[in-house]
Image (cartoon, helix red, strand yellow):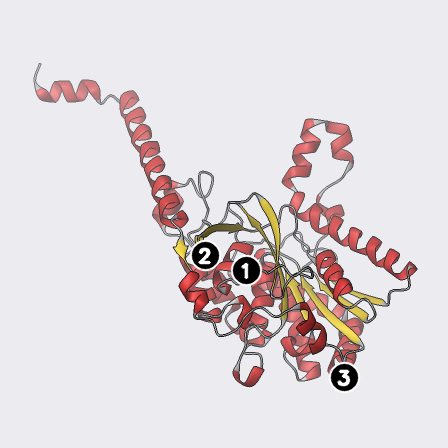
Amino acid sequence: MNLIDIVLKIFTPFNAFFIVMGTYFITIYFYLRWLTKKYLNPVDRTHDLNLSRRCLRTNNQLRQELEHRETVNILVLTGGGVRGMIPLQVLEKIEQLTGKKTGELFDLMSGASTGAINCAILAVPGIDHQFEFSTTDILDKYVENCRKMFSAPWYHKFLTLFGMLGPRYLPEGKLEVLRGFFGTCTLADIESNLIIPVYDVTENTLKIIRNWELPQGGRHTNYVLKDLVHGASNPPMLFSPRAFIISGKKHVFIDPGVILNNPATIAFMNAWFLFPRKKLRLVLIGNGGSDAEVYNHEHMAEFGAYGLFQYLLNSPVVNTKFSTDLLHEYIHEAREYGIDIEFIHINSPGGRELATSDTSDENMDRIRQFGEKVISENYDKIKYLAEVLKVKN
């Protein structure tokens, strides 16, 4: 038997299939190992933070800054991937009506996931303690930047089975966009008061990151802003997380969206603790949809494990609705105790057809149209907000 006969005997169609598949999955294994090593090999940010010219402000400094204000204005943006364009369209309308940037209009901003990205950008400092970016600045290149973020080379798609065996996208495009907005900016450098929730994988805990100190004299760690925001908007099924070190301590942040996609309650509680005698105006801007449209709670009782699976599958959407319900309960109780709070929720029903990571022209056009619908259906609220924020005292 010659060599050709031996090769033909070994590489029968049946054997060739298993050889090819075996080679494919071995390649996948080593590729995923390489990804893990590349992105979870921590970068030491201690030197970068030591170069920062500012420290986190104290609670007393924050109170003194807003001492003359009768009303504290709070902005909250939820997550939603590329649907984050919708709240920006609403804010752009408010900016047009007031002639001011969003950072000038709100005293405290908080966002989860894509909301964290937008709030942080709107808080970036410019010249003479002004704000660098308006919502128009973000929207001008929104589709282009989203396409950079939600991108991956062909080999990554092939070696992760289009996101089934690893993160669906590589983070380089997203990090490029964040560097373009934040540069070397740190959490302590930003002008506005900012709250960003993250999930710290290294400590297995939810963290609420603020750019001011805790009441009992504890100190928050300063962060390079692009590290913090990348982690806060980083669902591990979509992007590879990045590890970094500060003062010898390793951090790996991911998006807390499954357990906290709406930080409105956290923003409300922080403002309440800081300013118990002031009026609070809380503005929550959504991006469409509700859990009632997506998930029927009777599934859990009627279909047992299947119902539980449905609940877990829709948990980010359900969580957003539950968070809003909880916020309504807190606000109702706060008013019972005489706390002056005004809650303005800007959103519209529908929008189930709007995908969160699809950057096609068709999906982005649908999102833009839905944003126009939100503005139209909530125009009275938007006009009122513009009037009171323009002359905020």
User: Where is residue 66 shown, x and y percent of the image?
Assistant: 72, 76
Which amino acid, by three-letter code, is at mark 3? Val
Looking at the image, residue 193 sits to the left or right of residue 126; the answer is right
Quadrant occupied by the N terminus:
top left
Callout 3: helix, strand or loop?
loop
For marks 2 and 1 on the same chain, the one whose residue lies earlier in the sequence: 1
Between residue 164 and residue 352, name the one nearer to us: 164
Quadrant of the frame with the C terminus:
bottom right
The image quarter in which residue 26 lies: top left
The residue beneath circle 1 is: 221
Alpha-carbon span between mark 3 and mark 2 = 43 Å
Residue density around tag 2, few if under 14, some if 14–19, many if 20 or more, within 10 Å: few
* Residue 189, horizontal then vertical, whole percent: 53, 72
Pick out the residue farthest to the front.
217
Q: Mark 2 — residue?
A: 247
**Residue tagged by mark 3?**
391
Q: Nearer the viewer, residue 316 or 349?
A: 316
Q: Are marks 2 and 1 in contact (CB under 8 Å)?
A: yes
Amino acid type, residue under disc 1 in the picture:
Thr
Contact check, label 3 and label 2, Cβ < 8 Å: no
Amino acid type, callout 2: Ser
Residue 9 visible in the snapshot: yes
Q: Is residue 217 left or right of residue 155?
A: right
- Does label 3 or label 2 sit earlier along the sequence? 2
CA distance for labels 3 and 1: 34 Å
Q: Nearer the viewer, mark 3 or mark 1?
A: 1
In the figure, is residue 146 to the left or right of 64?
left
Mark 2 and mark 1: span between their CA atoms? 10 Å
Foreground of the two, 15 or 327? 327
Q: Earlier in the sequence, mark 3 or mark 1?
A: 1
Q: Secondary structure at mark 1?
A: loop
